[in-house]
Image (spheres, rainbow, N blue to C red):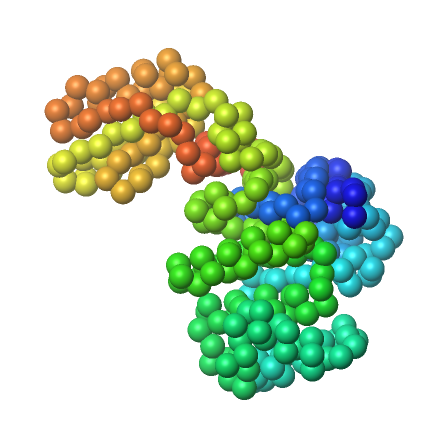
Amino acid sequence: MTGMAIDVRGLTKRYDGRAVVDDVALQIAPGRICGFLGPNGSGKTTTIRMLCGLLTPDAGEGTCLGLDLKREGRLIKRQVGYMTQKFGLYEDLSIRQNLDFVARLFELPERPRRVDEALQRLGLASRQQQLAGSLSGGWKQRLALAACLLHEPRLLLLDEPTAGVDPKARREFWDEIHRLAAEGITVLVSTHYMDEAERCHELAYIAYGRLLARGTEAQIIQQAALTVWSAQTDAAPEALTALLAPLKAAPGVLSVASFGSAVHVAAQDAAALAAAIAPYREQPHLRWTQAEPNLEDVFISLIGQAPDNVTGGKPS
């Protein structure tokens, strides 16, 4: 495949007259891992379902794996592995029975061999007779990924696959994702975790149905052009908590967020930010230093500027 794995423009989906996905353009090359980020209700899942042929766009055009998004949805489904937010396999079947059932759905030849290979690849062979309903979150995640890979897809669409999974299982999952990408499989993965975003080759950030930022981590941070000041204290945590409300209301401030024992205050207008923090600069229990913006600073700032597709205004 020499073209883009995903190449869509103007992707739009409306419900009750409201655009839950609004004019989204997305291009991802083969073998790339693209992190799809955004708050709950931002349109990530709807976008993913349009890309894999489960939903038909109301507007827009493009291709997925070289196939027309509107006319060839059934063919797209055969070449995509889609992992949903919630565990979607049968809890009263064993790991092996679940994989065999999925292999039957895809009418795969040599089913026992394909199932064996999936069990070995995801480290499930020793547990293959265990009921899916008795598995922990991390093992359910492995089973779901194994089911996605049975038919050897060229594209993986993973919708918040590590929600509720412990850090060790998340790390092992991401190691496997990078191995798959090295084999040429393209991955679009939605996540709320900033450490996972940093593991992606590139990122796309969506809020209220609109794509707000696109590029590598470094590009997105650079494009945001934020100035960030950090306040730290050795006093009680309440000293920092007291800063949150007044700084959020200050003119020009785009985001105020707590990071452990520090508070980050971000703005694009350096002068406005300086004026906002000026009343607090001389407080003896606070130490102010200029900081490098991180992805979380950028994304909180972006959503603060995005118009709400329900109310039509900016979020409060």
**Residue lying at the far top of the rendered structure:** 271
100 left or right of 125 in image: right
Camera-nearest residue between 80 and 173: 173
- Examine the rendered structure and indicate whether residue 82 appears above or below residue 207: below
- Examine the rendered structure and indicate whether residue 242 appears above or below residue 76: above
Q: Position of residue 308 (x, y in %)?
A: 56, 37
Total marks shown come to: 0
Residue 202 visible to an observer of this rendering: yes
Q: Position of residue 288 (x, y in %)?
A: 24, 24
Pick the quarter of the image with the C terminus.
top left
Q: Position of residue 168 (x, y in %)?
A: 40, 61
Residue 48 visible to an observer of this rendering: no
Q: Position of residue 153 (x, y in %)?
A: 71, 61
- Examine the rendered structure and indicate whether residue 74 appears above or below residue 57: below
254 left or right of 91 in image: left
Choose top left, top right, bottom left or bottom right for residue 87. Answer: bottom right
Choose top left, top right, bottom left or bottom right for residue 93. Answer: bottom right
* Residue depicted at x 65% and y 54%: 183
139 left or right of 84 in image: left
* Residue depicted at x 28% and y 21%: 277
- Examine the rendered structure and indicate whether residue 105 appears above or below residue 186: below
Camera-nearest residue between 67 and 303: 67
* Residue depicted at x 51% and y 84%: 130
* Residue depicted at x 69% and y 79%: 113
